Amino acid sequence: MLSCSKYSICVPGFDPSLSMMTGITPINPMIPGMGLVPPPPPTDVPVVKEIIHCKSCTLFPPNPNLPPPSTRERPPGCKTVFVGGLPENATEEIIQEVFEQCGDITAIRKSKKNFCHIRFAEEFMVDKAIYLSGYRMRLGSSTDKKDSGRLHVDFAQARDDFYEWECKQRMLAREERHRRKMEEDRLRPPSPPAIMHYSEHEAALLAEKLKDDSKFSEAITVLLTWIERGEVNRRSANQFYSMVQSANSHVRRLMNEKAAHEQEMEQAKESFKNALTGILTQFEQIVAVFNASTRQKAWDHFSKAQRKNIDIWRKHSEELRNAHSEQLMGIRREEEMEMSDDDSGDNPSKKLRVDDSALAAQAYALKEENDSLRWQLDAYRNEVELLKQEKGQLFRTEESLTKDQQLQFLQQTMQGMQQQLLSIQEELNNKKSELEQAKEEQTHTQAMLKVLQEQLKSAKELAEINGHDESQANEINVLTVALVNQDREKNSEKRSPGLKSEKEALLIGIISTFLHVHPFGANIEYLWSYMQQLDSRISANEIEMLLMRLPRMFKQEFTGVGATLEKRWKFCAFEGIKTI
């Protein structure tokens, strides 16, 4: 019997529940470097597969001279493998015993045929399962064909794996977008504060802010924005002029601040020059100490290393002293040049400069006056444009009023025409009902004539048989004519025909009850939908014709105007009884 080598995938007799009892972290036997599975060999070294022993079966390696088994292209996020060539007697427990050594199994879907699908918890476990492709599996020590089979393990394309992979990719994309957005927000310059719109109240507040030195920078920005927007017009010109004047009053303050800062700079320069002079004096003293140390009286008593250090320190101190002395000399030369400029200001050219400054002030004043006149001209232009726009709006409003009147007139005429059409339709329906009634009367009289003619023939035949005389026959003819005339008179008196059947009487009773509980009436569609629940074969036209045949019981009214015009039927039998 073959023994399990140290490079085998499974450990014979290994109890997975041992870790649960002892509290030791479970060891995955397929992890390389754990002593159970050798690390993956280099690509140039041929892979030597060995026999794998399990409790219920044994796996024999394929022939090493044969080419490796082929596999399909690996799907993204693949965690599921296809296992074919299983023995016919292989159970789900045996399959789990073999493949759980590759990693945690989440699901096994076994077919009735010799294959199954196994889904692992992680993607790297699929590679370990692919390693078993080509092995011949034998259950126990049986030699039956149903207990052996050659395994073929390949990648499987599962929707769950692809969905998890897509979710992971979307999560990584969201993280990347969030990281880029955070980076852009960090590098984006802050947006300027929003400028409020111009109003008299805001202008009064802004004028107060312009007088305050601490809020001047914010207020001058708002004033500049308003002027660039074109808020200056004839009405607000004085207010803007006062705000511009307030801004001009800060010029003297800024000049005073500049002079104060220049004075502070001069004081700082003087203090810096005094400090630099003190530092240079100390450097001179240090260099004098090094020079005294290099004299023969003291130099002979120092060791060689001490002499070397003193020499290095002396050279470094001399370099620093020379640099500071040059800096101090440069400051003094600048002061001398400034003093020479101040002295040259007393010559006649100073008068020319004063004249030039006066001319420049006059030119600046003329420029300001020109700008103010130009602004006034722009304000007048804006007012003219506003007046033109208002005038155009008035014309437009007059035109819109005339159009509205025309539309109202057209709507009224349309409503009148609709009412005329409805009245004409009502008359047409009445004529149709009268024509139908006349046709029914004609058919009824024709039927009565036929019946009377038959009765007359039968009476004549009986008279001939019984031997009656002609006087009796004439009396029979007179009676028949009288009956026909009496029938015609009754039909002429009854313009509305009677009920044809018991069904019509039932319909009239149901419709009367329905309309009686609806005192404001109901349209024909609503009534037809209610009758459809009782008799699905009845039509709306039949109901409407029945209502029109009984004008003393049902009447028709029109409600609404235009598009909301509606025709309703009401129950009026009680009103007819009162009037009779």
Image (cartoon, rainbow, N blue to C red):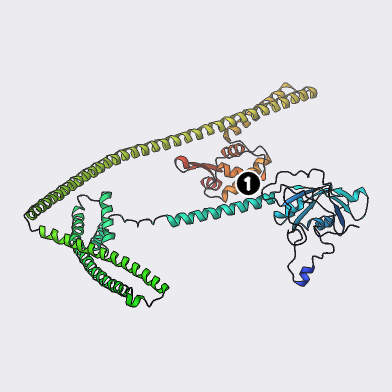
Residue placed under numbered mark 1 in the picture:
510
Taking 265 as reference, is 340 left or right? left
Front one among 457 and 549: 549
Crowding at dot 1, Cα within 10 Å, few <14 / some 14-19 / many 20+, comes out as: some
Residue sitting at x 43%, y 55%: 187
Front one among 269 and 28: 269
Residue type, mark 1 in image: Ile
Expressed as whole percent of the image width and height from the top left, the position of residue 348 reads: 6, 54
| Residue 212 seen | no
Residue 287 lies, with reference to residue 239, above or below; the image says below
Number of numbered discs overlaid on the protein picture: 1
In which quadrant of the rendered view does residue 537 lie? top right
Quarter of the image containing the N terminus?
A: bottom right
Taking 85 as reference, is 526 left or right? left
Expressed as whole percent of the image width and height from the top left, the position of residue 350 reads: 8, 55
Front one among 163 and 124: 124
Q: Secondary structure at mark 1?
A: helix
Expressed as whole percent of the image width and height from the top left, the position of residue 567 reads: 51, 41
Front one among 497 and 410: 410
Instruction: Give the residue at the far right of this rendering.
Output: 143
Taking 169 as reference, is 318 left or right? left
In which quadrant of the rendered view does residue 314 lie? bottom left
Expressed as whole percent of the image width and height from the top left, the position of residue 18 reads: 79, 68
Residue 345 lies, with reference to residue 282, above or below; the image says above
Residue 153 lies, with reference to residue 14, above or below; the image says above
| Residue 522 seen | yes
Taking 4 as reference, is 502 left or right? left
Residue sitting at x 82%, y 61%: 11
